[in-house]
């Protein structure tokens, strides 16, 4: 009767069946009778006043149903929401879904055409005539905060949205007479999240009931926000996230196109579809990262850290979107990493520029923080001629010190940095590679070997609602699940988290099968539709399992409790004497008298003979609000060969040992790590959103924005240590972002490690051959503003590089 | 409007099409063959890869009129109608997909790769699929899946013996 445990087994995914056969329900697949197509005219300039728009010719084009400007919709389109006012005096500009009087980034919508098909809609855009009166582009954050700078929002009188400060310990004392002080300026370049499925929206109305399908990560949040912005009552609006082709944070948003499609459906009484092109999306899907980090680390001569000062400029782009201002705060508690220190000072200013707004991208704040501290640890090791692993060991929290309250005020519940590091070191053949490195250095080999270390942790599983509240976030961080045991004994599970590649349909069925003792195949997981899943906080921040999975665990327990009562009634025994094992209830000591869960479910459904006060049918609801974040950690080691003559970097080997606590499905976990590594390595080596001097995005296509292909990435060696989380009954931690957070500093540390004998102590990201080559030659101006060549005004005009 | 005659997954279609209509849009919007998704507009991502007379093409960079008189195979036409094609099965077994958006194109491109090179090395798979982008998997399991399918598709030693 007792099957092998599902939790921990490498179940092949249930969702694959439709994905590998082309039977997927992407939003753009949806067809409805009379469906119209929308296309948006977008600003071709970074900053300008709209002085006139003539849409009359466009309206006459064949197949065109309607054309609207921002002014036409001004009374009803509202302002796109920002749910995270990080300070009381934060500057929060209006953000009309379609610009009315001024445009502030290339790609901002200025008009929308609705036509019979997508070709006709695109054609009509060419017939719209807009007059722009040019205003100055604001591109560089450091200049934008100077006195007299050109302004993105003239009426606000400043380009600074907010300043947010966190202090702990006596930072002045930590730096006073410190034997070692390391000061660095690192740039987190701007990235484009690039989910493979472009955004798409379909909207329809039947009477005053609206349904909006969107390629979104957040159907529940989107429903509430769209109701708030458009005035369509929340209970008249259903939001569906059908199959969604990846998000990585980019679909954790309330987009102007979603608002516009809803309003146009309301106005025209016809269903409307909009699907973006990739080049449209590169310019208008929110971007990620984009910080200038000024860092100071004080240490004793034995390498012990005394204190850390962080001064950030974070590019908000032109507007504050859903959680734009909060992203750097998600890193604020992570700059200290896994290390102990006496004092910490964090200051962040959110800056407006005339660029695409930024917001969450895989890791959201924590990759930036982890990069800073892990790069600094290598610099500290270099300064003291210590092995980078040794300097970390002298500072990290020892496994016997957990739970540990960090200088940033978080309580890390569990971890074992020693174990992960030992395992990684062994898999990597650390000592052999160090020997080879020494040999290549001695020989003056033109191809040098570098070893990069990243011993990271991160805070995920967003999040305890009270903590989010204390940071002024507009909502909570709980998650919901319900379990319905159907009369036949089959089980439906409803989850409020909204999968878009994470494998919930498989992992949730595994948890349920184990808890209820039913076959895996008997469980169906429903999600992503507000009519099916009425409550939820959706999927982001590596929260699904650590929060939603625990809600499901609790909902299963509740169903068993209810069934136990029914079983006791059927078996004419006291509830206290009923055991539940392998999907059946029995009277303790009388194992031959038992009832299966299926039998109990049918009896509860028939309801002919129920215990006093028992409500018919077997079902339950549970909402879980965690007490703490989840803190996965790990040790990543990267060996990179750097050609000193060409600047070309080749990753020779990459070892990732992650500790994500208990694992429900090791196959899915390994897949998450692989994908995370790819995105983190891509930040280190390949990707950058580049703007030219006029504020035009020059990386609008996949030909210009270098998303790595299979041939650009190494084969990874992944392994795990398992230190269960102590803050949830499953012992699980988040895994979705860990690989991305850890890998970027591992790669750059490897490159700098290879070149340290040449006096190089930094290479700005992405570490393209040209940038590596220039760093080796003492810096100097870059000749190229080509995308991917590491030039232009990507994220800053002044690149930080070696003084050597 | 030009008239085209195209066989898609074993069914013959005769249609009048605008000369500029992309094959990808013809498949999706006119025929309802939505198993083939579109991921970009510069033929970089390969999500829309199909076979045109047995050769892989990115259907966003082929006009429907260019496919006139030819045979198109999409992900929906793979397999024998009963079970999965060995590549589809291998992608499932090796967990070579997460969101799955790139998967149809990746499988169709891999099919063409294995036609040209029935026993590719890891490196050859990586180079052979460099025109198809995936944002979820880091490619490692895709490489495994293609090599596994290569093994499943190659004649077994016993069969080789029999045909000798």
Image: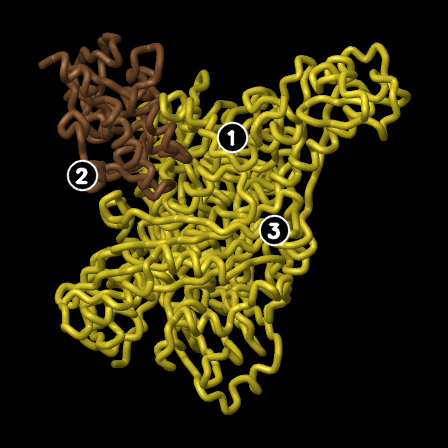
Q: Position of residue A432 (x, y in %)?
A: 28, 63
Q: Position of residue A111 (x, y in %)?
A: 40, 40
Closest to the observer, A351 or A726: A726
Chain coloured brown: which letter?
B
Tell me: residue A323, above or below residue A612: below
Q: CA distance from mark 3 to mark 1?
A: 22 Å
| Shade representing chain A | yellow
Q: Secondary structure at mark 1?
A: helix
View extreme (right): residue: A612
View extreme (left): residue: B164
According to the picture, the residue beneath numbered tag 1 turns out to be A506
Q: Residues within 10 Å of mark 2 (few under 14, many from 20)?
A: some
- Scheme of colours in the image: by chain
Indicate which disc residue A123 carries: none
Within the image, what quadrant is residue A200 found in? Answer: top left
Q: Is residue A317 visible?
A: no
Which residue is drawn at the image coordinates 83% and 16% (left, top)?
A570
Q: Residues within 10 Å of mark 3 (few under 14, many from 20)?
A: many
Q: Look at the image and tell me in which quarter the C terminus of chain B lies.
A: top left
Tell me: residue A669, above or below residue B90: below
Q: CA distance from mark 3 to mark 2?
A: 41 Å
Chain of the residue on which disc 1 is drawn: A
Indicate which disc residue B124 carries: 2
> Are dots 3 and 1 in contact, CB under 8 Å?
no
Which residue is drawn at the image coordinates 39% and 48% (left, top)?
A718
């Amino acid at each position: 009767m007792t099957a092998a445990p599902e939790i921990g087994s490498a179940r092949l995914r249930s969702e694959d069946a439709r994905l590998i056969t082309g039977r997927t329900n992407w939003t753009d697949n949806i067809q409805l009778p009379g469906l119209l197509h929308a296309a948006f005219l977008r600003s071709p300039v970074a900053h300008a006043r709209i002085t006139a728009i003539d849409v009359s010719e466009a309206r006459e084009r064949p197949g065109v149903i309607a054309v609207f400007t921002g002014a036409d919709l001004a009374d009803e389109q509202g302002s796109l929401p920002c749910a995270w006012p990080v300070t009381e005096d934060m500057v929060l500009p209006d953000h009309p879904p379609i610009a009315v009087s001024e445009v502030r980034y290339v790609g901002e919508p200025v008009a929308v055409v609705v036509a019979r098909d997508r070709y006709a809609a695109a054609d009509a855009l060419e017939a719209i005539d807009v007059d722009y009166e040019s205003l100055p582009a604001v591109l560089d954050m450091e200049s934008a905060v100077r006195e007299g700078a050109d302004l993105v929002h003239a009426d606000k009188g400043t380009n600074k949205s907010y300043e947010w400060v966190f202090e702990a310990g006596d930072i002045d004392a930590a730096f006073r007479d410190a034997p070692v002080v390391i000061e660095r300026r690192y740039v987190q370049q701007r990235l484009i999240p690039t989910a493979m499925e472009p955004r798409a929206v379909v909207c329809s109305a039947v009477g005053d009931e609206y349904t909006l399908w969107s390629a979104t990560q957040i159907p529940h949040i989107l429903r509430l926000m769209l109701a708030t912005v458009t005035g369509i009552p929340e209970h008249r609006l259903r939001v569906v996230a059908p199959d969604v082709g990846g998000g990585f944070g980019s679909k954790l948003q309330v987009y102007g196109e979603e608002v516009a499609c809803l309003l146009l459906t309301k106005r025209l009484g016809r269903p409307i579809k909009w699907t973006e092109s990739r080049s449209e999306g590169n310019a208008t899907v929110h971007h990620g990262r984009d910080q200038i980090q000024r860092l100071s680390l004080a240490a004793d001569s034995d390498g012990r850290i005394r204190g850390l000062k962080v001064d950030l400029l974070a590019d908000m782009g032109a507007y504050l979107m859903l959680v734009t201002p909060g992203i750097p705060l998600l890193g604020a508690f992570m700059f200290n990493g896994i290390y102990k220190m006496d004092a910490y000072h964090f200051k962040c200013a959110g800056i407006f520029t005339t660029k695409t707004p930024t917001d969450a991208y895989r890791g959201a704040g924590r990759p930036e923080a982890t990069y800073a501290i892990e790069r600094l640890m290598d610099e500290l090791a270099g300064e003291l001629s210590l092995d980078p692993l040794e300097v970390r060991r002298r500072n990290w929290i020892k496994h016997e010190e957990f739970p540990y309250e960090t200088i940033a005020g978080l309580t890390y519940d569990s971890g074992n940095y020693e174990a992960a590091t030992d395992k990684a070191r062994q898999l990597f053949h650390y000592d052999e590679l160090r020997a080879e490195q020494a040999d290549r250095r001695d020989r003056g080999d033109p191809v040098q070997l570098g070893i990069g270390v990243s011993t990271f942790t991160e805070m995920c599983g967003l999040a305890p609602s009270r903590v989010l509240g204390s940071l002024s976030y507009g909502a909570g961080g709980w998650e919901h699940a319900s379990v319905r045991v159907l009369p036949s004994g089959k089980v439906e599970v409803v989850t409020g988290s909204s999968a878009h590649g994470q494998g919930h349909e498989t992992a949730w069925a595994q948890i349920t099968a184990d808890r209820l003792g039913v076959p895996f195949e008997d469980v169906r997981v429903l999600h992503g539709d507000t009519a099916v899943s009425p409550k939820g906080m959706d999927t982001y921040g590596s929260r699904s399992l650590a929060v939603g999975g625990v809600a499901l665990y609790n909902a299963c327990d509740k169903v068993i409790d209810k069934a136990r009562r029914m079983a006791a009634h059927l078996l004419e025994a006291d509830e206290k004497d009923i055991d539940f094992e392998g999907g059946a209830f029995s009277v303790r000591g009388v194992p031959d008298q038992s009832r299966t869960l299926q039998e109990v479910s049918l009896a509860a459904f028939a309801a002919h003979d129920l215990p006093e006060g028992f409500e018919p049918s077997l079902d339950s609801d549970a909402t879980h609000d965690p007490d703490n974040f989840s803190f996965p950690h790990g040790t990543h080691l990267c060996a990179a060969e750097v050609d000193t003559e060409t600047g070309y970097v080749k990753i020779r080997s990459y070892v990732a040992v992650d500790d994500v606590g208990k694992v429900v499905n090791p196959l899915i976990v390994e897949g998450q790590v692989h994908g995370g590594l790819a995105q983190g390595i891509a930040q280190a080596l390949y990707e950058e959103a580049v703007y030219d001097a006029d504020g035009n995005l020059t990386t609008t296509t996949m030909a210009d924005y270098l998303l790595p292909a299979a041939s650009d990435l190494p084969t990874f060696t992944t392994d795990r240590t398992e230190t269960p989380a102590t803050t949830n009954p499953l012992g699980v931690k988040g895994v979705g972002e860990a690989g991305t957070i850890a890998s970027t500093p591992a790669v750059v540390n490897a490159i700098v490690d290879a070149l340290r004998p040449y006096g190089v102590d930094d290479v700005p990201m992405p570490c393209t051959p040209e940038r590596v080559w220039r760093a080796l030659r003492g810096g100097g101006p870059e000749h190229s503003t080509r995308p991917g060549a590491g030039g232009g005004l990507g994220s800053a005009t002044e690149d930080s590089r070696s003084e050597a | 409007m030009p008239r085209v005659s195209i066989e898609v997954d074993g069914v013959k279609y005769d249609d009048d099409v605008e000369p500029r209509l992309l094959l990808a849009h013809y498949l999706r919007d006119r025929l309802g063959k939505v198993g083939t998704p579109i991921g970009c507009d510069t033929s970089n991502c390969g999500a829309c890869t199909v076979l045109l007379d047995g050769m892989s093409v990115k259907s966003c960079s082929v006009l429907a009129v260019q496919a006139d008189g030819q045979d198109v195979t999409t992900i929906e036409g793979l397999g024998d109608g009963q079970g999965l094609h060995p590549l589809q099965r291998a992608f499932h077994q090796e967990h070579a997909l997460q969101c799955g958006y790139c998967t149809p194109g990746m499988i169709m491109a891999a099919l063409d790769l294995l036609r040209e090179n029935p026993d590719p090395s890891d490196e050859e798979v990586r180079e052979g699929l460099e025109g198809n982008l995936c944002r979820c998997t880091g490619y490692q399991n895709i490489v495994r899946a293609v090599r596994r399918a290569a093994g499943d598709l190659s004649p077994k030693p016993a069969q080789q013996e029999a045909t000798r």
